[in-house]
Image (cartoon, rainbow, N blue to C red):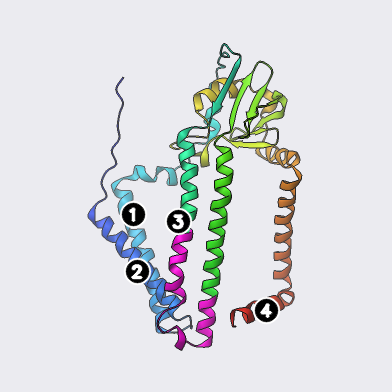
Amino acid sequence: MKSTQYSRSPTPPLSRVLAILASCLTIWGILCLTKNAHLGAITLRIGLASIACALLTIGLMLWLEYRRAPELFSGLLTPRASAAQLFENLTAWPLPRDGQALISIQESYAKRLRRSVWVAFGFAIILVIMIPLLGGGPDAAHVTKQAALVRKLVNFEIGVSVLFFVVWGIFSFIFIRKLLKSRIGIDALGFLYDDGSGQLQRYDWSAVLTDRHSLLIGRHLVRLAPNGRTSAEGRFASDPLRGYVLARLPASSYVSHYRLVWTAACRSNLTTRMWYGAAFAVFVLTEYLEAYPKLASPVRQAFVDWLSR
């Protein structure tokens, strides 16, 4: 059987030149905006004009790339196929001789998860490098009080962003180590699931729900395809997933997306519900402070005083 190989067409020199020009204009615009934040200052106008020219250059580059290879934009400009295709023309596979079929995570999916962790740490390193470029300089001792406050605010925002990406990477690393060991499968008695702890848990078929995009196994929510893309492989191999698992789902397991989300929230443990409650409380508090800004003014003033030290 012959395998067809697709080679990516080389990028034309004009697109490369436009990409370099857009990057230089963006960096120059950001440096001008952080150099002087006073409205009406010449550096502010130059920074805004540079960013505007960078956006126009990026738009021109994308238009040229679309004229050259429109198939590269098919995932953005056309509706993407969803994981619902996994449920089409299902045929149940017979169980193996040992009476148990287990499906492990695909290696391509594992590589994407590991890459996301390194991307998080990469963003953190880039932001750390940007701190001396944006927040200081040889003339840092001769700037006005307002400009110094702006620089401290920029440093504070970058520091918070660095902390976010570092924490995200650490928690993702811990979570991924367990996730990569997870398995799903079936036997003659019901549905099997291993959350990465090495112990198989058996569920009745009535406890497994799906909205044709995700599987709710007990209180574990398993996404079948990443972001509904056709080019990216899912968490588990599609053929064994269709033959062993999806083809055996009863009709009562098919529910709407909202019912699946509600059932997952009801089945969640106390820790997850506390996170949901905390997120909802923060949202309500934010909306309340926006409605009554006088209540938030002391906190803002204290924050400004802390930066002004």
Q: Position of residue 112 (x, y in %)?
A: 47, 42
| Residue toward you, 138 or 30 | 138
Residue under pointer 2: 25
Q: Residues within 10 Å of mark 3 (few under 14, many from 20)?
A: some
Q: Which residues are magenta?
A: 124-152
Q: Quadrant of the C terminus?
A: bottom right
User: Real-space Cα distance between discs 4 and 1?
Assistant: 48 Å
Instruction: State the separation of the CA atoms marked 3 and 4.
Output: 33 Å
Three-letter code, disc 3: Gly
Three-letter code, disc 1: Trp
Query: Which residue is painted at 59% across and 82% down in the image?
Result: 308
Compute the Cα span from label 2 to label 3: 23 Å
* For residue 103, side relative to residue 125 (left or right): right
Element at label 4: helix
Q: Nearer the viewer, mark 2 or mark 1?
A: 2
Residue 206, given in percent of the width and then of the height, sits at 72, 25
- According to the image, label 4 marks what residue? 302
Few, some or many residues within 10 Å of mark 2 (<14, 14–19, 20+): many
Task: Tell me what residue is drawn at x 30 percent, y 35 percent.
Answer: 6
> Which callout, 1 or 3, points to the residue nearer the camera?
3
- Numbered tag placed on residue 63 in the rendering: 1
Q: Nearer the viewer, residue 25 or 117?
A: 117
Q: Are marks 4 and 2 in contact (CB under 8 Å)?
A: no
Separation of residues labelled 1 and 3 (CA atoms): 29 Å
The answer to if 137 sits in the magenta stretch is: yes
- Per the image, label 1 sits on a secondary structure element best described as helix
Find residue 198 and report its horizontal and vertical position in percent.
62, 31
